[in-house]
């Protein structure tokens, strides 16, 4: 952390604002829930919706996590096809994007997610 702050100071003195910003970003590292952090939890699907605009269609799925919190996640069309309201399973996400869904079928989970 100290080396990152030293880099920022040197870059500022040299007049490199962009370099200072880059040094600051590198020094921050990965703190908590960022777009790069993949989190997982047992959840139940409570809603699905599509938002259509000039830019295309976005698919959103809302989950109730086992701790009682709710989270709405952006999904791909193919992910939205295999998820339905009332399902329970394990949800994986990064930021506001769904990265995986493993539904419970009977007593055993079955992973139907494919990477895109």
Image: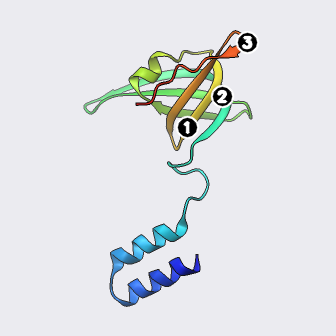
In this rendering, the answer to whether 13 lies above or below 40 is below
The Cα atoms of the two marked residues, 1 and 2, are separated by 13 Å
Residue under label 2 = 64
Query: Counting residues from the N terminus, which is met first, the one under dot 1 or under dot 3?
Result: 1
**Quarter that holds the C terminus:** top left
Q: Position of residue 110 (x, y in %)?
A: 61, 17
Separation of marks 1 and 3 at Cα, in angstroms? 23 Å
Q: At 54% across and 15% down in the image, what residue appears?
A: 84
- Checking the image for residue 61, the label placed there is none
Q: Of the residues under marks 2 and 3, which one precedes in the sequence?
A: 2
Crowdedness near tag 3: few (<14), some (14–19) or many (≥20) residues, C-alpha within 10 Å: few
Disc 2 residue crowd, few under 14, some 14–19, many 20+, Cα 10 Å? some
Q: Is residue 13 above or below residue 77?
A: below
Query: Label 1, on which residue?
Result: 93
Q: CA distance from mark 2 to mark 3?
A: 20 Å
Tag 1–tag 3 contact (CB < 8 Å): no
Label 1 SS:
strand
Instruction: Provide residue 14's location: percent of width, then percent of height.
Output: 35, 89
The answer to which quarter of the image holds residue 67 is: top right
Which circle, 1 or 2, is nearer the viewer? 1
In the displayed structure, does residue 39 sit left or right of residue 79? right
As drawn, the residue found furthest toward the left would be 54
Q: Which residue is mark 3?
A: 107
Q: Secondary structure at mark 2?
A: strand
């Amino acid at each position: 952390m100290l080396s990152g702050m030293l880099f920022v100071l040197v870059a500022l003195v040299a007049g490199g604002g962009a370099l200072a910003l880059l040094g600051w970003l590198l020094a921050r590292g990965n703190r908590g829930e960022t777009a790069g952090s993949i989190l997982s939890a047992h959840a139940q699907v409570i809603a699905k919706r599509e938002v259509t605009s000039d830019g295309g269609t976005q698919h959103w799925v809302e989950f109730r996590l086992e701790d009682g919190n709710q989270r709405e996640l952006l999904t791909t069309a193919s992910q939205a096809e295999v998820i339905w309201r009332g399902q329970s399973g394990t949800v994986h996400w990064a930021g506001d994007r769904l990265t995986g869904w493993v539904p419970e079928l009977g007593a055993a989970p079955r992973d139907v997610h494919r990477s895109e």
